[in-house]
Amino acid sequence: MIETVRYVAGVDEAGRGPLAGPVVAAAVILHPDRPIEGARDSKRLSARQRERLAEAVRERALAWSVGVASVEEIDAHNILQATLLAMRRAVEALSPAAEFALIDGNTLPRLAIGARAIVGGDASEPAISCASILAKTHRDGLLRALDAQYPGYGFADHFGYPTPRHLAELRERGPCRAHRRSFAPVREAAALAARGPDRFLL
């Protein structure tokens, strides 16, 4: 069936694991006559390579879009459902519209078009690889903005992931509005901060 479809979108997300910031998904329909050389899973690329390839995707793809689910939506619905929501938003924002979607992972968002889940698709499907790159670079930009808004946590360095520095700052400062309260380390830090100065007597 997919062989007869004209517009196939690759879809991937970035930011399921971090303790802070939104989850971001991207959708990409590649142009058959404008291949993007070097595109692969964003985790296998340096930051400079990702930025260069993201620019190429935006210039050469037939269509691309980004969908975001906020920290509030993550806490309200859980990270999986928020990720699927971001994916749906990305697909629905494409112009021209996709007729079929290839989704990285093993769970499909609710879409009005046909879709297939592909585990490891960011390494095997060029359109998903390109979506992975767009999602990652877009989210990194959002976290740099959060770093300026909430200085001291190091968001521009670890992008919200639970690194030793982030966990130490979270314990010291308590969570900010950018943190995901539904994630256990953030809940624990919030409970610790609520105790006030006595927490340091532990």
Image: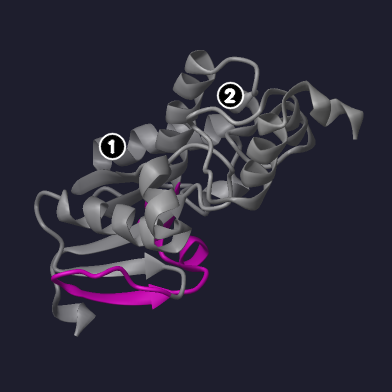
Q: Is residue 22 above or below residue 80?
A: above
Quarter of the picture containing the N terminus is bottom left
- The magenta region covers 107-132
Q: Residue 31: x percent and y percent?
A: 22, 52
Q: What residue lies at 86% left-to-right and 27% top-to-bottom?
A: 200
Reading the image, the residue beneath label 1 is 58
Disc on res. 156: 2
Q: Is residue 10 magenta?
A: no
The amino acid beneath tag 1 is Arg
Residue sitting at the far right: 201
Q: CA distance from mark 2 to mark 1?
A: 23 Å
Q: Secondary structure at mark 2?
A: helix
Q: Nearer the viewer, mark 2 or mark 1?
A: 2
The mark nearer the N terminus, 2 or 1, is 1
Q: Is residue 1 above or below residue 178?
A: below
Depth check, front residue: 143 or 179: 179
The reply to whether discs 2 and 1 touch (Cβ–Cβ < 8 Å) is no
Q: What residue lies at 53% left-to-right and 44% top-to-bottom?
A: 181
Q: Is residue 130 visible?
A: no
Depth check, front residue: 60 or 161: 161
Q: What residue lies at 19% left-to-right and 47% top-to-bottom?
A: 63
Q: Secondary structure at mark 1?
A: helix
Q: Residue 154: x percent and y percent?
A: 65, 23
The amino acid beneath tag 2 is Ala
Answer left or right for 12 relative to 160: left
